[in-house]
Image (spheres, grey):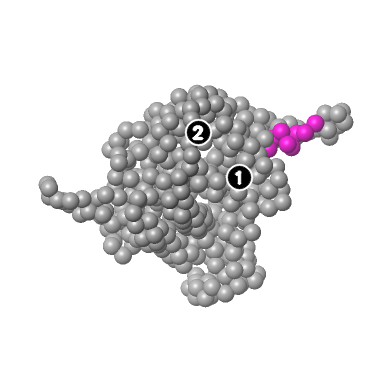
Amino acid sequence: MQRRNDLDALRVFALLLLIPYHVAMAYVAEWDFHLKSSHTVEWLQWPMIALNRWRMPLLFIISGIALGLALPAKGRWRFALRRSWTLLLPLLFGIVAVVSLQAYCEAVDNGGVTPGLWAFLWRYWQFRPWPGAGFAGAGFGFTWNHLWYLAYLIPYSLLLIALATLLRPLRFAVPRGSPSDRTVALIGLLVPVAWLAWTVLYLLPRHPPTHALVHDAFVHAESLPLFALGFLAARWQRGWELVLRWRRTTLALALLAMSVELGIRALGRLPGVEGLDPWVLALPWATSERLARALYTWTALLALFGWARAWLDRPFRWLPYAREAVFCIYVLHQTVLILLLYALRPLALGPWLEPLLVLAGTFALCVLLHEGLIRRSALLRPLFGVRPPRRATRPGDAPTAAGASMARPTSP
């Protein structure tokens, strides 16, 4: 199987996008984050909302596609165990050795603990509830912060592999005839939008995201179906052709839906809005905003896949290295940016120099740690999700397991 270079490149960009997004979280006004700068601004909310609607759905659907493409015909349970371990090891190591540093900065900043890193880590590594410690997850005694994505991928992957294996012996009757491309495209647009609309209209107000794996109905209702949809559509060639063909339409719909959602939010903030006529205030503004959100999320995903297929489906020279590095950078990036902000904030560098140094420093330090340390260590590579190096093969040799895996999109 040839690599899907467009999906590999889209995954690289989606994971790297987390760096500016999480850096901006420290500077956006009125939004909670583990560590905030004193230079927060309100205007950042608008681009952050525009990114927030599709950034994690994109990662989940790409992960489902990668699983669908990589799932072997035989040895699926071994594959499931190997994949679970590949995700679980960086998650556990991240909780212990990476995210724990974030928790320390957050706890000291909130006044929950006194400064002293080793004393904090000794208590943190006991994994006992720590009431009053002042960091996210203190009630559990530990936190996975941005690594929650890995914690969700493990059960999602096991569930899909189990269902695919159990349902494999069944033979489903295929109806005669084939619906037109327009019918398929319309169903592929309306059904996911209807589901996403239900999640934001019904589940989100009642079950806000927790990212704690348990008691997180909205995130599961949004992420698991997208993961499963990616898994099912991974090898559906007709679907990919339609996504490519309709990319201009989905982009136009995404821009329209985003404008409606952000426009309604902006109207609600205008001064004197409470003084409008009662019939204007009685209009279903909140429902319209959430319907636009659902439409924007799905059409943005379709547009991203369509334009990636058009522009990125080629063997870029930088792509093999980026595929390896990006997961390591994902594990490191939020801890690095919080440590940088924790160190730079007392220097009072101003509202422009400080965020620029945090952004550039986060990217540079993550790349340097990967290139200079992690990828060169056989011990550290699996702890950060970096695959073992490929062994050179002589002409005529059978491909090794590592070489065979390179013919499929990487995971997650």
Residue 319, x across and y down, in percent = 32, 41
Q: Which residue is mark 1?
A: 28
Point 48% across, 30% down: residue: 176
- What secondary structure is the magenta-colored segment mainly? helix
User: 277 or 224, which lies in front?
Assistant: 224
- Quadrant location of the N terminus in the rendered image: top left
Q: Is residue 344 left or right of residue 282?
A: left
Q: What is the three-letter code of the residue carrying label 2? A: Pro
- Tag count in the figure? 2
Let me know if residue 77 appears in the view.
yes
Q: Can you give x and y, in whole percent of width and height, for residue 207 in the image?
A: 68, 53
User: Which residue is situated farthest in the right direction here?
Assistant: 278
Position in image of residue 355 (x %, y %): 51, 45
The numbered disc on residue 239 is none
Q: Amino acid at mark 1?
A: Val
Q: Earlier in the sequence, mark 1 or mark 2?
A: 1
How far apart are labels 1 and 2 at the CA level? 52 Å
